[in-house]
Amino acid sequence: MTSRTPEAERTSPTEETFSADVLKHLKEIYGKRAHEVASALTTPGKYFYLRVNTLKTKPTQIIDQLRRSGYKASGHPDIPEAVRIPIEGPLPIPNQLQTVRVDKFTAESVLLGADIYAPGILNCRGLRRGKKVMIVDNHGFKVGAGVAKMSETEILTQRKGLAIKVTHPPYNIPSLRESYEFKEGLVYLQSLPAMVTSRVLDPKPGETVVDLTCSPGGKLSHISQLMGGEGIAFGINRNQRKLALARETVERLGCRNVRLVVADGRYLDKDHPEIKADRCLIDPPCTALGVMPKLYDDTTASKVEALSAYQKQFMRAASKVVKPSGIIVYSVCTLTIEECEEVARFGVEECGLTVEEQPLTLGSPGIKTVFPAAAKTQRFHPHLHGNGYFIALSRKDA
């Protein structure tokens, strides 16, 4: 990591919060615009998105409900189930005498309008209920202000529950996880590229579809939704805790055609040879460099290389799980060429796949200098689209 600004001066993250390796990857892709991209990564973008669960309700009804609640909600011209709300900010954050330090995930959640729960707190020395506090991440960046709902003793002993009610987030973003619409499974909070991914997969009623790395179940529930609950949507994950999160999601949204399987997706063809799919989604672990807002990122070149190799294992497995002429969609919320175009090229050169044009393109073409067919993939750029994301659509040779 490069040197950081003294804590007293840390009011917002800058590109200095990215490791040298991250900046190197950004410059490799964006050249002179790397600075602009780095700056964009520290913001949440222009819109907050959610997906309407058409298994239970209609987009027009949700838009009307959100507008009655004071949100400037509108539909999306290309994805009927998508709803977007403008994000306002950055907003001023008042200084408070007492500071509460939170972990990276919690701090970035505060930027998105979330309150703070006890497990996310790193330091709250002397905190009392009702105390006004300034919230900082573990590098000292100020991310918001709020009011304590728990004391230091309660936080340390209980380690659960609402600890800080955020009263002054830096951006005005809807907090809908406690809403009736969310709890009843009428909506799912999801980024636009994630919704595009399932639309590119284009699952049909009656088909067999496999999500090789499902959790927390966002894309899996969207797949079920697009299938109208007909056919079979397999959700695969080797981690039972993560699979439990997917189960909670699909049950809340009423996805009746989902089957969850505890298995390592990299070996699904060997462990479950009976599963043969018409379509397969690969959304594997990645460096998540495209997730916004990003307070800092210490990703190293070795981690990028390791994850790229890991992702290719899922690509190989998917090529064996899908039927001849079957569809494979690969998606990652990151930016590096190693995790994006290089994995798509691996599918072509090592797995008998052909990259095809996508039925829905809201991003930009992939980097064709990596290999010519990469022009048929799509990238979402942080400074242009409000996310960093990559999607490739391939077909298994007959």
Image (cartoon, rainbow, N blue to C red):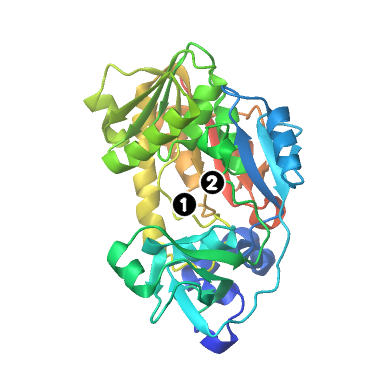
Q: Position of residue 143 (x, y in %)?
A: 57, 71
For disc 1, the marked residue is 338
Asked which secondary structure carries label 2, the reply is loop
Decide which of 317, 145 is in the foreground and name it: 145
Label 1 CA crowd tier, 10 Å (few <14, some 14–19, many 20+)? many
Quick one: label 1 or label 2, which is nearer the N terminus?
A: 2
Viewport quadrant of the C terminus: top left
For disc 2, the marked residue is 177
Decide which of 30, 146 is in the foreground and name it: 146
Name the side, left or right, on which 283 lies relative to 40: left
Give the amino acid type for the residue marked by disc 2 in the picture: Arg
Give the residue displayed 63% in from the left and 58% down from the top: 44
Q: Position of residue 130 (x, y in %)?
A: 50, 72
Indicate the quadrant where residue 292 lies: bottom right
Give the amino acid type for the residue marked by disc 1 in the picture: Glu
- Considering every residue shown, the one lying at the far top of the view is 206
Indicate the quadrant where residue 358 lies: top right
Asked which secondary structure carries label 1, the reply is loop
Give the residue displayed 70% in from the left and 73% down from the top: 92
Give the residue displayed 31% in from the left and 69% down from the top: 156
As drawn, 24 above or below 324: below
Can residue 116 be seen?
Answer: yes
Assess whether mark 2 and mark 1 are in contact (beta carbons under 8 angstroms). Answer: no
Q: Which disc is residue 215 wearing?
A: none
As drawn, 265 above or below 36: above
- From the image, state whether disc 1 or disc 2 is nearer to you: 2
Viewport quadrant of the N terminus: bottom left
CA gap between label 1 and label 2 equals: 34 Å
